[in-house]
């Protein structure tokens, strides 16, 4: 599972003296532990999907922080956040391109017979389940909305 891989990579980062990677991986480990304790799974551990969800959330936090730092004219801090995001993204599944996601959205909508904005929540849930962490939630919502409004 991802947690074991992160642990091994943390050891390697510490041995090589890569402080940015080590601190980022410690942060990820902490976030995973927090969710494990919160869900009462400290002994059994998280499923891979749960781990991916935690990592995706951490990646998104880094992106949002970088955007705020850029707006505040703090390029150095934004660069650090983006480097951390890149480290986290190495553990996430490859993200689908917009074209690939459009075909998934179209397939889900046609298979399920969903139509109209009242089915938007069902369509988003089905697409997220089908893509299993390989698609950005905001992009999924935007594409589903565009498709259901036609």
Image: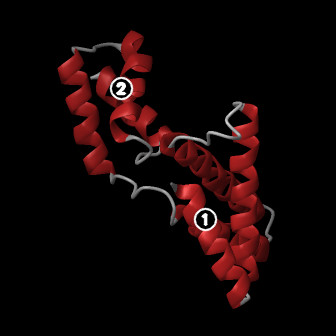
Q: Quadrant of residue 10?
A: bottom right
Whether residue 130 is visible here, answered yes or no, is: yes
Q: How many marks?
A: 2
Q: Is residue 139 above or below residue 25?
A: above
Front one among 37 and 124: 37
Q: Is residue 82 above or below residue 61?
A: below
Q: Is residue 139 above or below residue 73?
A: above
Q: Quadrant of residue 71?
A: bottom right
User: For this view, does 37 lie left or right of residue 140?
Assistant: right
Image x and y of residue 103, in percent: 22, 40
Q: Secondary structure at mark 2?
A: helix
Front one among 140 and 133: 133
Q: Quadrant of residue 78?
A: bottom right
Whether residue 18 is visible here, answered yes or no, is: no
Q: Is residue 85 above or below residue 142?
A: below
Give the residue at the far bottom of this rendering: 16
**Nearer-N-terminus badge (2/1):** 1
- Pointer 2 residue: 126
Q: Secondary structure at mark 1?
A: helix
Image x and y of residue 92, in percent: 49, 57
Residues under numbered marks 2 and 1 in contact, where contact means CB atoms less than 8 Å apart: no
- Pointer 1 residue: 6
Front one among 62 and 150: 62
Q: Which mark is residue 71?
A: none
């Amino acid at each position: 599972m991802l947690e074991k891989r992160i642990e091994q990579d943390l050891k390697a980062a510490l041995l090589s003296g890569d402080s940015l990677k080590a601190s980022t991986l410690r942060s990820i480990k902490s976030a995973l532990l927090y969710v494990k304790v919160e869900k009462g799974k400290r002994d059994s551990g998280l499923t891979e999907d749960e781990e991916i969800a935690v990592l995706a959330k951490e990646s998104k936090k880094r992106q949002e922080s970088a955007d705020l730092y850029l707006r505040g004219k703090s390029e150095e801090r934004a660069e650090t956040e983006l480097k951390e995001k890149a480290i986290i993204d190495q553990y996430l599944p490859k993200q689908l391109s917009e074209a690939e996601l459009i075909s998934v959205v179209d397939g889900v909508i046609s298979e399920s017979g969903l139509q109209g904005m009242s089915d938007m929540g069902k369509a988003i849930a089905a697409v997220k389940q089908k893509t299993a962490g390989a698609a950005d939630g905001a992009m999924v919502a935007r594409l589903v909305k565009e498709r259901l409004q036609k």
